[in-house]
Amino acid sequence: MNSHFFKRFKRNNFMMIQFVILLLVGLAFTSCKKVSESPVVDNPFFAEYETPFQVPPFDMIKPEHFIPAYEKGMAEEKAEVDSLINNAEEPDFENTIAALARTGKLLSNVSRVFGGLNGANTNDELKAIQKEMSPRLAAHNDEINLNEKLFERIKTVYEKRGELNLDGEQAYILENVYKGYVRNGANLNDEDKAKLMQMNQGSSKLGVQFGQNVLAETNDFKLVIENEEDLAGLPESSIAGAAEAAKDADLEGKWVFTTQKPSMLPFLMYAENRDLREKLYTAYFKRGDNDNEYDNKKVLSDLIKLRVEKANLLGFKTYADYILESRMAKNSDNVYDLLNRLWDASIPVTKREATELQAIIDREGGGFKLASWDWWFYAEKLRKEKYDLDDNELRPYFVLANVRDGAFWVANQLYGLTFHALDNMPLPHPDAQVFEVKEADGSHCGVLYMDFHPRASKRGGAWCGTYRSQSRKYGEEIDPIVNLVCNFSKPSGDNPAMITLEEVETLFHEFGHALDNLLSNITYGTTFRSPDFSELPSQIMEHWSTHPTVIKHYAKHYETGETIPDELIDKIVKSGLFNQGFITVEYLAACLLDMRYHTLTEPQDLDINKFEKDYFDKAGLIPEIISRYRSTYFSHIIGGYSAGYYGYIWSGVLDCDAFDAFEETSLFDKATADSFRKNILAVNGTADYMEMYVNFRGREPKIEPLLKKRGLQ
């Protein structure tokens, strides 16, 4: 409105101006209100990302963007599914199965970004969004999974699959989509579908509560040390890290240790104050079991009860039967056969190890019986005695950046990949690093984010996911954006971040998952991955991490740049079987606990601590060892590893046998690497698991390499 017009308008219609002003104010208020409730304008999810490689614009994404984006994403996916089922054409693979794979693009984008941020950089706003959206998303998914018209189209395509001339990927996807809908309740009557939806939403709420409780318990505990003598035995790097943690907690001049493993494990390994070791380790294994607002015992009991009810409703005797039907293991008997065989071989080894540790205590005049919080401390002493190897001797050579580059070098030797640091990129957190990954010919392969250090906003452990997965489902190549997250010690003072040998293996492990995503070569973006196979690409990388050739490439002293001496490498190799009884039993105990919960045949209210203790007593777990995960913080079985935590050892059979294929030729044999890429990494999740392995290895896997690696033969 120009000034001349405004003057004339004011002179002739003063009352009208008042009305217009009030109207404009009202519209502005309404607009602001709508934006705050459902901000459509400037929501970065509602447009194509104008960023390099179309990575998520993390710098623009705010918590208030998520719920509107989730809502729009769900509405769009529902409309896309409605369009699919109302298609008048005869159902076929392209207009039904491929069309279904193309639905939900916005919802997937939002969910991946939210999942990445909530796992590695959460806050109260994101936690509240997770609580609100989790049951809503479960209901949305059920609405699609239980859609009768959609299932009829899928069923029609499935029943005429023999006439469709499908390729291997298409046939595998069709079979698994059809079976997946059946497993998700498509054949239930309306009453049972309603029950299933209530169960799924209830399980979703409980899962969110469980995870948030574990994070809260982890963050709430701090072992504050005021007397310097209580630091006796600890390495300088651990002391410096504790001093910085104290400073961050406004406790400057003191030292803070937490139940985050980079803080806790060095304390358990080296701190001479036994009472403090007990205090810290007890806080760790009591997480979720403290009869407070974060107690997870009833949460877990209710969740297990719902899972049994769901399995029974869907026609399965146990939840494990329901889960394992689509896994490589197929059934719980096969899982128990492997676990029990390894358990029986490992328990005698742990007893011998415990006897050796007790002998050190007695020789030193300790006057006490070995307890769980003593194991790491005396195991380090024993390793020093047997192999003259101290983890603190190794750490100066394991500079995090060098180890990372060592993993990059292995990928280059195997697959020709190169990794190029990117500047001025949107980051999910300031600690994150980002790299462009290129093929041997220089063409773009994908983008890799890496986030290495612990913080209060990040859940524990290490994992690898994607902000975007590779596919060609929209008719053009979609390159992956991969996100690798760990919890390694931070740099301290002027020193770079240095990690332990175990953390070296963890980095290579998660990098193996990253390669699995980066080197995927599929069309529809629909995969059916099983934990008992999907750990193969990650665990095989651990073999390279400690191979002498690879260690010599990345292990450089942080001060001198000197390559790690051969004598230290020799000690690492010779100590490879050290403490394997403990490592194996601690892990197997968690596997068996997971299976015990999920092979219950009837829903019941469990006394979680009694259930856990009774089972371990019966199984013969020695009291000096506590399961790697106790029930109340066993986050794996709340997420995608329910009745599946055994997958690491099942994949262990595969990765040990697969690495033997390289040792039979050469460490970086090109033909073997090309076969592994073609038959495992490129097609993972789109072909039969055993068929994939046989195509690579030329035969089924053998267990002997695993037994040899763990010293259990």
Image (spheres, rainbow, N blue to C red):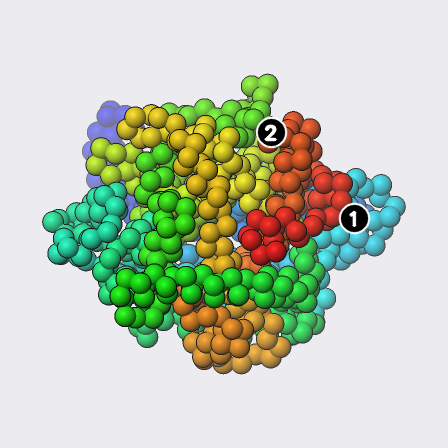
Q: Is residue 386 above or below residue 397?
A: below
Q: Is residue 121 left or right of residue 112?
A: left
Residue 668 badge: 2
The residue sitting at 46% across, 76% down in the picture is 613
State the residue in front, 284 or 385. Answer: 385
Give the x, y percent position of residue 298. 43, 75
Q: Which quadrant of the structure image shows residue 518?
A: top right
Q: Earlier in the sequence, mark 1 or mark 2?
A: 1
- Left or right of residue 549, residue 225 in this image: left
Mark 1–mark 2 distance (CA, rounded to whole Å): 47 Å
> In the rendering, which numbered label is found on residue 91?
1
Q: Quadrant of the N terminus?
A: top left
Location of residue 219 with respect to 609 vertically, above or below: above
Percent x, y of residue 699: 76, 44
Label drawn at residue 340:
none
Work out whether 137 lies above or below 366: above
Residue at coordinates 24% horizontally, 50% vertically from top-left?
A: 234
